[in-house]
Amino acid sequence: MYAIVRNGSKQYKAEVGSVIKFEKLDKAVGEKVEFEVVLYSDDNGIVVGTPVVENVTVIGEVVAQDKFRKVIVYKYKAKKNERRKQGHRQPFTAVKIETIAAK
């Protein structure tokens, strides 16, 4: 059993027990989060939402608030002695999926 959940403009595959790294959510560690379900699959088949599946909920618990590894952005213009080095670390929220429940 799995579900495709939507958070912001991205979609993620959620299975019970999996840990998913979402873009930063305004939740503290230990809080519960509920997600919109776009697609739901179980033994009976697949249900696709228009745009979301009614009567199906995915609930997870926030495990961590952290940042990804640093990405180095290096720009330069040839023959102009123009260089720029910049680093970026994207914040994320790790959520452990606890239940996928169909009502």
Image: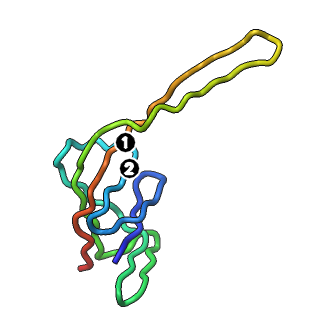
Q: Residue at x 24, y 59 (%)?
A: 60
Q: Residue at x 32, y 37 (%)?
A: 66
Look at mark 2 in the image and give the residue it sits on.
22
- Vertical position of residue 76 compared to residue 30: above or below: above
**Quadrant location of residue 77?**
top right
Look at mark 1 in the image and give the residue it sits on.
92
Q: Is residue 103 left or right of residue 90?
A: left
- Vertical position of residue 90 compared to residue 54: above or below: above
Number of other residues with Cα within 10 Å of mark 1, as a class: few under 14, some 14 to 19, many 20 or more: some
- Vertical position of residue 81 compared to residue 5: above or below: above
Q: Is residue 32 left or right of residue 85?
A: left
Q: In the image, what residue type sits under mark 1?
A: Phe
Q: Residue at x 38, y 76 (%)?
A: 40
SS of the residue at dot 1? strand
Percent position of residue 37, x then y: 37, 68
Distance Cα–Cα, label 2 vs label 1 = 6 Å
Q: Is residue 74 left or right of residue 103?
A: right
Closest to the observer: 102 or 96?
A: 96
Q: In the image, what residue type sits under mark 2?
A: Phe
Closest to the observer: 23 or 48?
A: 23
**Quadrant location of residue 26?**
top left
Q: Disc 2, disc 1: CB below 8 Å?
A: yes
Percent position of residue 25, x then y: 32, 44
Percent position of residue 17, x then y: 26, 64
* N-terminal label among 2 and 1: 2
